[in-house]
Amino acid sequence: MIISKKNNFIFLKTAKTAGSSIEFYLSQFCGKKDTITGLLLNEEKLKKKLNLLIKQNYEYKKIKFTLKNFKRLRFSKKIILNDHSSLKVLEDKIKLNLNEYYIFAIVRNPYQWIVSYFWWYLYYEKILDISDLNKLNKKEINHLFKLFLRFQCSYWFSWMKDIIYSNKHKVHIYKYENMEKNIKKLKGILSLDNEKIKFKKIKLKSLSINSKIKHKLKLDDDDVKLIRKEGKYFFDKYRYSKKVPKTFLK
């Protein structure tokens, strides 16, 4: 997440939509009073090496008078923003004047989105390391994916919706599939000048999974039905086709 007072924008970072790369890129236009949440340690080190602003101003203190706080002589509460903090947190807890900002986020084709999260989940949750992932056969991959959908599909799409949803404020949504055009458009809208690093030069968070392994993942009718059900908000609101991408067809 970035809250830029300097350029009057808020970037809400959804997961698996090149969000870290976008945050990395946008940090070059930020000022010292802007909020920038943290990336991975190696990514923060790279930003520092390139003289870009690293994570800063992500802790907020809000005055809160309650009987419990009075007894403890504590009259403020610390709110820590993370990279995937929601707009609701800014509305309800920090009570930022959101009318002053251009708010935007990235969404993605729900089929591709949940599959991308699946591979990252296996690695990030330490279920399998990369070497083991690259040894999986087709049956093993599709069995794991079914289990993953059963326990994570509903949670995933609810989480992504919660990050960007607001019934009070306009959130400008850009599609992952049009990333280069999005960046060009945002530069104009936000008047981002003095670009030091071009977006296409930024390459972060790449899992070295063999492409042949990824192509073994196929969706059956039950998988499709569940993804359509849980991802309905994104299919409908952002007009993504419910047709299954060819890469996932048996």
Image (tube, rainbow, N blue to C red):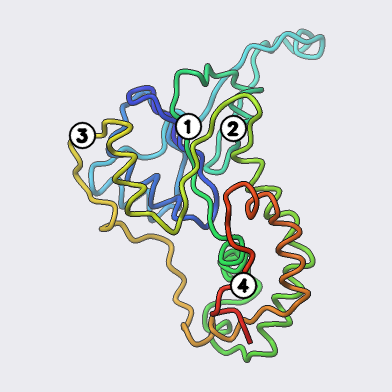
Task: Please report contact status of discs 3 and 2: CB closer than 8 Å, yes or no.
Answer: no
Task: Please report contact status of discs 2 and 4: CB closer than 8 Å, yes or no.
Answer: no
Sequence-wise, the earlier of marks 2 and 1 is 2
**Residue found 52% across the figure and 16% down from its top:** 97
**Residue found 69% across the figure and 56% down from its top:** 231
Gap between marks 2 and 1 measured at Cα: 9 Å
Q: Where is residue 77 in the image (x, y as percent from the top left)?
A: 65, 20
**Residue found 54% across the figure and 19% down from its top:** 96
- In the foreground, 173 or 81: 173
Gap between marks 1 and 3 measured at Cα: 19 Å
Q: Identify which amino acid the numbered label 1 is placed on.
A: Ile
The nearer-to-camera label among 2 and 1 is 1
Query: What SS does tag 4 mark?
Result: loop
Sequence-wise, the earlier of marks 3 and 4 is 3
The residue at which mark 1 appears reads as 103
Q: Identify which amino acid the numbered label 4 is placed on.
A: Val
Task: Please report contact status of discs 3 and 4: CB closer than 8 Å, yes or no.
Answer: no
Quadrant of the image occupied by residue 246: bottom right
Query: What SS does tag 2 mark?
Result: helix
The residue at which mark 3 appears reads as 193
Task: Please report contact status of discs 2 and 1: CB closer than 8 Å, yes or no.
Answer: yes
Gap between marks 1 and 4 measured at Cα: 30 Å
The residue at which mark 2 appears reads as 87
Q: Where is residue 214 in the image (x, y as percent from the top left)?
A: 54, 81
Left or right of 224 in this view: 40 = left
Q: Where is residue 117 in the image (x, y as percent from the top left)?
A: 59, 64
Query: What SS does tag 1 mark?
Result: strand
